[in-house]
Amino acid sequence: MTFRATILTLYPEMFPGPLGVSLAGRALGEGAWACETVQIRDFAADKHRTVDDTPAGGGAGMVLKVDVLARAIDHARTANPAAPVLAMTPRGKPLTQERVRELAAGPGVTILCGRFEGFDERIFAGREVEEVSIGDVILSGGEVAALVLLDACIRLIPGVMGAASSGVEESFENGLLEYPHYTRPNEWEGRTIPEVLRSGDHAKIAAWRQSQAEIDTRLRRPDLWERHCGARVQPASGARRKDEGK
């Protein structure tokens, strides 16, 4: 089954972009996934191909028109009806590795890329569209966010990465950040590779990596650590918080 990506955008020339090189580009050339762009302007009803209008109630910027968006989505769904439709927006649910794995295992995705002030809210009531965010940042448009989502999915398609285990021991795959990596030279500016990694003892190496993943997650991403173990996060120093009132 080929993973099909359909991108609804005002700037189709942005695709495949960086996904046309390296592992993703090779996989595209080999047919492991397919990329199709749909120009949203093609679904405008007037001679000027208008896709946006001023916000109801006033305010700055322009809003993408719901009727144009609906026609574009309906068109895309005829080509790949089983693929979920995702709208890239900072108002969406944060993208997780778990959701990426679900998408990568499916027939593909249809991605709606916003511009200007965003989408007419009625599109989410009138069509089955999942709102997705790649983080608490504002971009010029949804295209860059779509590239991020697609890259995360494509690398999980069987055969895209070299070793079958390449996508397993990575950040977020087991709820933790990935352990630190080292390679030759063994010494650089007085800093050496941890001795355990040079020991050849695979059991000790595995234990060290697990320990480092837990330490880094607890210190750098306490939110992930809490979700991972369900435990209350202690201060980075390891000291217990004093009871209130003492």
Image (spheres, rainbow, N blue to C red):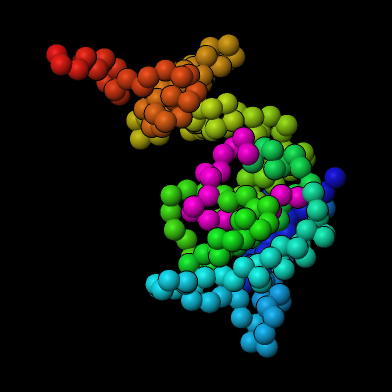
Q: How many marks?
A: 0
Judge left or right: residue 37 versus residue 79.
left
- Residue 29 visible at all: no
Residue at point 72%, 38% (across, down): 162
Residue 143 in percent (x, y) is at 58, 62
Image quadrant containing the N terminus: top right
**On screen, residue 19 above or below 237:** below
Displayed quadrant of residue 40: bottom right
Query: Which one is nearer the viewer's eye here, 161 or 115?
Result: 115
**On screen, residue 224 above or below 84:** above
Judge left or right: residue 233 versus residue 132.
left
Residue 5 in percent (x, y) is at 73, 55
Query: Please, which residue is most extreme toward the right here?
Result: 1
**On screen, residue 225 above or below 61:** above
**On screen, residue 94 above or below 184:** below
Judge left or right: residue 29 versus residue 181.
right
- Is 226 included in the stretch rendered in magenta? no
Query: Please, which residue is most extreme toward the left here?
Result: 246
Residue at point 29%, 17% (across, down): 238
- Residue 117 visible at all: yes
Displayed quadrant of residue 19: bottom right
Image quadrant containing the C terminus: top left
Residue 198 in percent (x, y) is at 52, 19
Residue at point 48%, 54% (across, down): 90
Query: Please, which residue is most extreme toward the front here?
Result: 57
Residue at point 60%, 76% (across, down): 51
| Extent of the magenta region | 83-99
Residue 144 in percent (x, y) is at 56, 59
- Is 93 included in the stretch rendered in magenta? yes
